[in-house]
Amino acid sequence: MESSNVQGTVQKLLFCKVVSKDFGQSKRFVELENFQLWAYMMFHKHGLRIQDISLWLWVCENKLQEYQELYEQMPDILQVSKIGVFLSDELNGFSHVIYRYSEEDQVSAMKKILMSHVSPELISSGNCELVVEQGYCIKNDIKNLGKMVLGLSENDTSIWACGN
């Protein structure tokens, strides 16, 4: 497959803590547009609870440097990579891409997890490409997630949405 570029230089993400039934914890960055569906699936399919949701903005390395004066005033900045998996389906004539965001120390593990979901045939045919783009997540100090788009509300009584 021909080399592709990761699209987009900024992305709104929600950062949260995921708690399993045995109280094991991990952290996740999830695209804002996908968060409600993702949270629903995590609870109903995997029995995970979602807690401590906060809004972050992922920016590529160049954008951070370009707007350094603005971003350095934000409360927290983390080094976070954007991992893109590009899939090409020659049989049906379309392609698909998924993105995941991972803190720098978790990138290798995330790459292995993502590639474990891709069929060996797709990999060996050269119709799968994994691209890592260096970037940063900048925390937004928003106090009221209830005003966010897509129905995300701190008053949501759905246990999967707030996870408390």
Image (tube, rainbow, N blue to C red):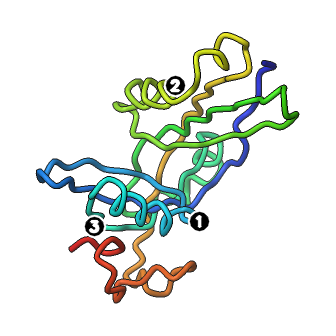
Residue 140: quarter of image: bottom left
Q: Which residue is mark 2?
A: 115
Tell which residue pokes out farthest to the top in this image: 124
Q: Is residue 92 left or right of residue 134?
A: right
Tell which residue pokes out farthest to the right in this image: 93
Closer to the camera, 84 or 63? 84
Percent position of residue 46, x then y: 32, 53
Mark 2 or mark 1, which is nearer to you?
2
Q: Of label 2 and label 1, which has the lower sequence position? A: 1
Q: CA–CA distance between discs 2 and 3?
A: 29 Å
Marks 2,1: beta carbons within 8 A: no
Q: Amino acid at mark 1?
A: Glu
* Element type at mark 3: strand
Q: Which residue is mark 1?
A: 33
Q: Is residue 33 left or right of residue 39?
A: right
Q: Residue at x 43, y 86 (%)?
A: 146
Q: Residue at x 42, y 80 (%)?
A: 145
Classify mark 2: residues with Cα within 10 Å, few (<14), some (14-19) or many (20+): some
Q: CA–CA distance between discs 3 and 1?
A: 18 Å
Percent position of residue 75, x then y: 37, 63
Image position of 39 with respect to 96: above or below: below
Classify mark 1: residues with Cα within 10 Å, few (<14), some (14-19) or many (20+): some
Tell which residue pokes out farthest to the left in this image: 22
Q: Residue at x 56, y 52 (%)?
A: 68
Q: Is residue 155 left or right of residue 91?
A: left
Position of the N terminus, as image quadrant, is top right
Closer to the camera, 24 or 93? 93
Q: CA–CA distance between discs 2 and 1?
A: 23 Å
Q: Amino acid at mark 2?
A: Met
Q: Of label 2 and label 3, which has the lower sequence position? A: 3
